[in-house]
Amino acid sequence: MFSYDGLIQKLKDKELTKTALTEKLGISSRTIAKISRGEKIANHVLAKIATYLDCKPEELCRSITDNVLLQTLRDEKSIRMSGGLYHELQVRMTYNSNHIEGNKLSEDQTRLIFETNTIDVGDGIPVDDIIETVNHFRAIDYVIDNAEEPLTESIIKNLHRILKQSTKDSTLAWFAVGDYKKRANVVGGKETTKPQDVPAKMQTLLSEYEELHHVSINDIIHFHYEFEHIHPFQDGNGRVGRLIALKECLRFRIVPFIIEDSKKMFYYRGLSEWETDKGYLTDTCLDGQDTFKKLMAMFNIHQ
């Protein structure tokens, strides 16, 4: 369902009726009927209305779901609420996920960037660490906005594009920001899927995953391992993989997990030894889920 409270308020402010809006913009009565029923209208129509009312499309329409956790995140995101679950998810997941990959920003510095858009960098902080922190905030927003959509290659590539845009890597022609890798890479001394084989491997992985009738936390953990095993991008695979896991947990009303930097050796061991013992990765992710449950309890949110 969709709420058009923003549109209704804008029309009131301009002393316009919905009928008058259709006449001025040439919008069909069917579109107005969809608005009244809380159904989704075409993006280009919403953009046309927003242009006429001199505002952004997201000010007119918002998605409403009975998924309590997801709706809470969307509500808090829409007003950039300070001190809530959305705020803590952004700071804690961004700090931990980036730090696992070698980002030098502290949690306090990450929090300062999110809260004030400023930073006291100190010595030795690479510019890319700051850029990727801001990008990760935007990637989480993208996950929240698209949580209920089926998982597709387009969504996965968009996450990579958002994460790596404006970084030094994005200036390299061969790096392929927002697309699969062009050069072979290794992880922990082990060769990953060859670039020419990545598209087919990813299509198979997504096809098998989307065919599941009931997705559990174990299925999402399994997908996460397979994604990291393929290692489809030149860099950023860990962060993209964890963002995908967040999206899918929100999609299927499963409490998400945050892998804390302090647990990264258990996490790496879990990925390395999955084929012989799934317990290490599973236990680490479930521990991260307990971390998120404590956050939800702090804000009295029950899934």
Image (cartoon, rainbow, N blue to C red):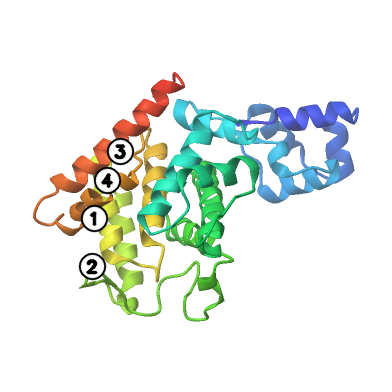
Residue 264 vs residue 174: left or right?
Answer: left
Quadrant for the C terminus in the image: top left
**Residue shown at the point (88%, 39%) measured from the top left:** 23
Of all residues shown, which one is farthest toward the left? 276
Q: Which residue is mark 4?
A: 263
Q: Which residue is mark 2?
A: 188
Q: CA distance from mark 3 to mark 4?
A: 9 Å
Q: Is the C-beta separation of discs 2 and 4 under 8 Å? A: no
| Mark 1 closeness class: few <14, some 14–19, many ≥20 residues within 10 Å | some
Reading the chain from its start, which is encountered first: label 3 or label 4? 4
Q: Nearer the viewer, residue 195 or 261?
A: 261
Q: Please, what is the three-letter code of the amino acid marked with disc 4?
A: Lys
Q: Nearer the viewer, residue 125 or 246?
A: 125
Q: Could you tell me which secondary element the residue under label 2 belongs to?
A: loop
**Residue shown at the point (25%, 37%) measured from the top left:** 286
**Residue shown at the point (54%, 71%) measured from the top left:** 168
Q: Is the C-beta separation of discs 1 and 2 under 8 Å? A: yes
Q: Position of residue 186 (x, y in %)?
A: 27, 73
Q: Please, what is the three-letter code of the amino acid marked with disc 1?
A: Tyr
Q: Is the C-beta separation of discs 1 and 3 under 8 Å? A: no
Q: CA distance from mark 3 to mark 2?
A: 23 Å
| Mark 3 closeness class: few <14, some 14–19, many ≥20 residues within 10 Å | some
Q: Position of residue 97 (x, y in %)?
A: 40, 50
Reading the chain from its start, which is encountered first: label 1 or label 3? 1
Reading the chain from its start, which is encountered first: label 2 or label 4? 2
Quadrant for the N terminus in the image: top right
Label ID, residue 268: 1
